[in-house]
Amino acid sequence: MAPWAGNDPSSYIAEYQALTTRITYWINLQYTVALSAATLLVLLAATSSQLPREVLLWGAAGIVDAFLAGYYYTIFEMMNNAQYIECVLAPEIRKMLPRVVFWQYERYRTCNKFYSPTGLFIPMLGSIAAPAVVIALRWRPSSLADLIGGVVTISLVCWSYALARTGGRAQLSLWKCATEEAGRTEHGERNPNTETT
């Protein structure tokens, strides 16, 4: 138990509210990053007649990969916050209120395969495809833009993968905490000996 909280559940509830608010901000940031990426792609397309082909191609790939890296960073932050809620805060509150079942959403979500840790990797296809398409279109890279574009986009792909992997592990951990607590089985069935409010 955190030494500052004592036996007062309201301290944990206040921390829960702060963390869920932070998660909401990260969700909002996802939309902001997506809108920024779309705007940059439109601007890139509008200036396409004035740019060399390799700058145009690598610029588009870089924008797509930067968007996906930003997306994965927000996922990483949200999963870490949710993991803390399920694995640290919830057990402390459940110790204080042992016969009360609450915060059931993560238990419910464990059956949803699209949002599973494996599902987090689906957008990686776009991240990998962006530089792959440019490399296919520029089979014989010959400019400084090809070198810089390749290094930047491949670095973003690697960073996105690391974030997705860490976020997926945090999600697995929080789902494990969610299903182990309060008399739930791995598949989310309710223990008949546990009361609900």
Image (cartoon, grey):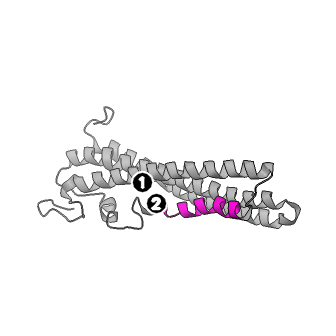
Residue at 81%, 62% (x, y): give it. Answer: 53
Residue at 83%, 65% (x, y): give it. Answer: 48
Is label 1 in contact with label 2 (beta carbons under 8 Å)? yes
Out of 28 and 148, give the one closest to the viewer. 148
Specify whether residue 25 is in view: no
Quarter of the picture holding the C terminus: bottom left
Q: Secondary structure at mark 2?
A: helix
Locate residue 147, reporting x and y percent.
Answer: 74, 49
Locate residue 130, reporting x and y percent.
Answer: 64, 61
Q: Residue 42's quadrant in the figure?
A: bottom right
For marks 1 and 2, give the CA distance: 7 Å
Q: Amino acid at mark 2?
A: Leu
Residue at 73%, 48% (x, y): give it. Answer: 148
Q: Residue 46's quadrant in the figure?
A: bottom right
Q: Is residue 146 magenta?
A: no
Residue farthest top in this picture: 3
Locate residue 87, reporting x and y percent.
Answer: 31, 47
Residue 178 sits above or below residue 48 on the image: above
Specify whether residue 63 is in view: yes
Q: State the mark number for residue 120.
A: 2
Residue farthest right in this picture: 50
Q: State the mark number for residue 23.
A: none
Q: Which residues are magenta?
A: 122-136
**Left or right, residue 107 beside residue 18:** left
Labels in figure, total: 2
Q: Is residue 130 magenta?
A: yes
**Left or right, residue 154 beside residue 177:** right
Q: Secondary structure at mark 1?
A: helix
Residue 57 sits above or below residue 17 on the image: below
Residue corresponding to mark 1: 168
**Left or right, residue 132 beside residue 95:** right
